[in-house]
Amino acid sequence: MKFKDYQKEFLLFLELERGYSDRTIEVYNRDLNQYRIFISKNRINYCKVNKDIIFDFQASLTNSLGPRSFSRMLSTMRTFYKFLHTEGIVTDVVLNDIKSYPSPQYKKSIPSFLSMEQILEVIDNINDNKKLSDNIKLRNQSLIMLFFTSGLRLEELQSIKLKDIDFTNKTIRVVGKGNKERLANFDTKTKDLMIKYLKSLQKYPLIKTNFNNNLFVNEKNKNLSRYNIQYLVMQNLKTLTLNSYGPHALRHSFATHLLNSGVELSAIKSLLGHENLASTQIYTHVSVQKLQETIKKSHPRGEK
């Protein structure tokens, strides 16, 4: 079989066996397309790849991909070749060469996190925007507050349907990465905003005929796309002094506030829908002020 045929089988494996989202599969497919173009152009047998060939592939991408992006590309190749190895297509030697190829080093930037005061400032700014209708104001406020108080991923928030919301217990049923289901929580202020928003659309109290409607829609009652939500959040956060303005900054803020309040890392991991603690630690840096306070209270040399 040709590379392209195994590529299709691999993507199907990611969907059916791993339960990966369409967006994740799209990234894998894009990476493999780029790799396939390289080996085809250079007449390389994909079953006989070694470290030298991977090095040449990396060199060919120097002007178009940074270290972080190539690190992701390398992860895609490792997963693909592990699949080929399981299928008996490549040897142990080929698989080990790819697995042992060093990932490029890069500095991981820590996203900004927002205080409650900053979030309330954003909410007030939305309310003062005279260009927006009342229901769009309520939608934008609800959306940003839900990100901030639930820690949802962009794709999770975008796919929320009315049937997923439990206003009594202030929870939302979400299906995260790997089709894993969990309950996300939100606070009373977010609940009040969402109810006001749904009332403005005449969708509250919830009725069965509306259960499959998405929570966040545009003026024409069409579902907001991922791009719509990304743009909406960035536009409303750009007035703040941050190094990250997207939905991820709100997700990171959720995790950071929990950690600073003493919530165990393992609990935060579950709330974020992470598979391992290593992923959670990226989001949850503790503020310098919080560390200093802990040292003063707990360390024998701390200032009293």
Image (cartoon, rainbow, N blue to C red):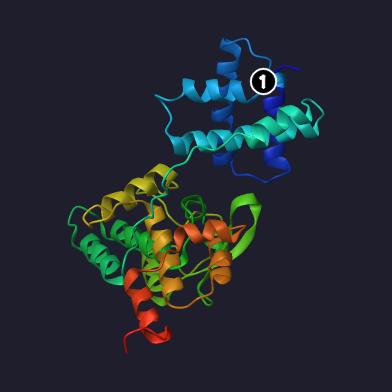
Residue farthest toward the front in the current orientation of the protein:
301
Whether residue 89 is visible to the viewer of this picture, yes or no, is: yes
Tell which of 261 and 15 is nearer to you. Answer: 261
Tell which of 168 and 286 is nearer to you. Answer: 286
Residue type beneath disc 1 = Lys
Tell which of 125 and 293 is nearer to you. Answer: 293
To which quarter of the image does residue 64 belong?
top left
To which quarter of the image does residue 82 belong?
top right
Identify the residue at horizontal 32%, vertical 73% (top origin): 289
For this view, does 107 lie left or right of residue 268?
left
Image location of residue 252, percent across then percent down: 42, 60
Identify the residue at horizontal 37%, vertical 56% (top origin): 249
For this view, does 99 lie left or right of residue 207?
right
Identify the residue at horizontal 73%, vertical 43% (top origin): 17
To which quarter of the image does residue 132 belong?
bottom left
**Quadrant position of the C terminus in the picture:** bottom left
Image location of residue 10, percent across then percent down: 70, 32
Q: Is residue 274 above or below residue 268?
A: above
Whether residue 9 is visible to the viewer of this picture, yes or no, is: no
Image location of residue 6, percent across then percent down: 72, 25
| Residue at disc 1, secondary structure | helix
Q: Which residue is mark 1?
A: 4
Image location of residue 263, percent across then percent down: 50, 76
**Quadrant position of the N terminus in the picture:** top right
